[in-house]
Amino acid sequence: MAFTRRSLLQMGAAAIGTAALGQAGAAVASSGLPDTLRRIIDDAVAQGAAPGIQLAVWRHGAPVLAHVAGKANLETGTDVRVDSIFRIGSLTKQFAAALAAVLAEAGKLDLDAPTSRYLPEFANQPAFTVRELVHHTAGLHADESGEALPGPVSQRHLAEAIATQATPFDFPPGTAWQYSNANYVVLGAIIEQVTGQALAEAGRTRLFERSGMTRTAFDHNQDIVPGRVAGYAFGDGDPPRLQNGPCVDVAQAGGAGAMRGTAEDLCRWHAALLDGRVVGDATLRAMLAPAKLRDGRLASAHRAREEDAAMGATEYGFGLLLDRATRDDSLIVQHNGFFYGFSTYLATHVPSRLTVACLCNADPNPGLPFRALRRAVFADVLAPAR
């Protein structure tokens, strides 16, 4: 597969030992859910959906279940562990969006200011705001013809490449919704510009340390990471033959998809965010509110791509899909992440604080367990399928 900057950005498009721990997990454990979840994960590995899978379930900020299956590295025969570190792809977006919200609360960033205030390279383009980047309503196009930039690059360099591409926009800013990783690469550049820090440092000091996330970071290929998991793709053959995922520069995915972490850290993240330990109540409400177009309509009223109609009533917030396909219209926040050799899922039912995180070291494929996990974990709140 040829590696281009566009193909890197496109990875991450939205889709959609074991222990029961603590009082928070008592009801879940007695329900038989842990056995169901273990079976889902073990079956997915046995059927070849991924060499290895890591699962965590939390409730009210406390661990309920941790389960792992399969191999972190097929060449060394290393097993997946609860502290094994996976690349998490587009789950990165909610962290970049939260960084923007934290900076806005601190008065360092105006979400409704034009992007050109912070990145002058966009001054000659139609105006779009920081908030429109966060909401995927800015319209930025990702050019698939350009090769990845050589050598280590800053997010600013990546933003400059997006600003000068031959086709800057897929639609006029603010008039439609379309998932584009280019939006979050540019957002990462704004964060670097406003903080004067590399994106990795801004994330570490402003989010990860404050949330107790000890095994989460913006990744770089050159980093030596104990417990790092190898990623795998599917080659030719019937069934398709597993092969090592391509070696690409993860840092060039920036705020769109460059992070690594564990399932437990991801559950810890949603606990911190939704319990108000990252931003204040008013900001959190804004982060969980659906995106709107400039004419005041919900962004879902005009999705630029016909295939996005499959999202139905699901809206988009600050790097989060807002799912209300529940019996009582209560909110599930969720997102998928894909990056060469890795597929991930994170979701929380906001009222009950029931969270599931699942990390797999394989490219997207029909055997991944994410849909089955969603149905099982949230069975008590999901509306009946039509």
Image (cartoon, rainbow, N blue to C red):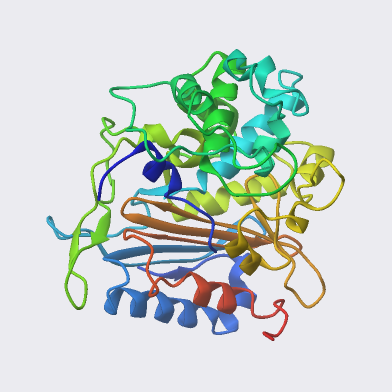
Using the image, determine if residue 240 lies above or below residue 126.
Answer: below
Which residue does the image show at 46% across and 55% down from the upper left?
A: 263
Dividing the picture into quarters, in which one does residue 184 lie? top right
Using the image, determine if residue 260 lies above or below residue 332.
Answer: above
Of the pair 165 and 386, the residue shown nearer to us: 165
Please state if 93 lies on the left or on the right of 344 as rendered.
right
Dividing the picture into quarters, in which one does residue 45 lie? bottom left
Q: Position of residue 358 (x, y in %)?
A: 46, 62
Which residue does the image show at 73% across and 66% down from the upper left?
A: 313
Q: Position of residue 78 (x, y in %)?
A: 19, 57
Q: Number of marks in the image?
A: 0
The quarter of the rendered structure image containing the C terminus is bottom right
Which residue does the image show at 37% across and 68% down from the upper left?
A: 365
Q: Position of residue 141 (x, y in %)?
A: 54, 39
Dividing the picture into quarters, in which one does residue 171 lie? top right
Residue 132 visible (yes or no): yes
Q: Position of residue 251 (x, y in %)?
A: 38, 32
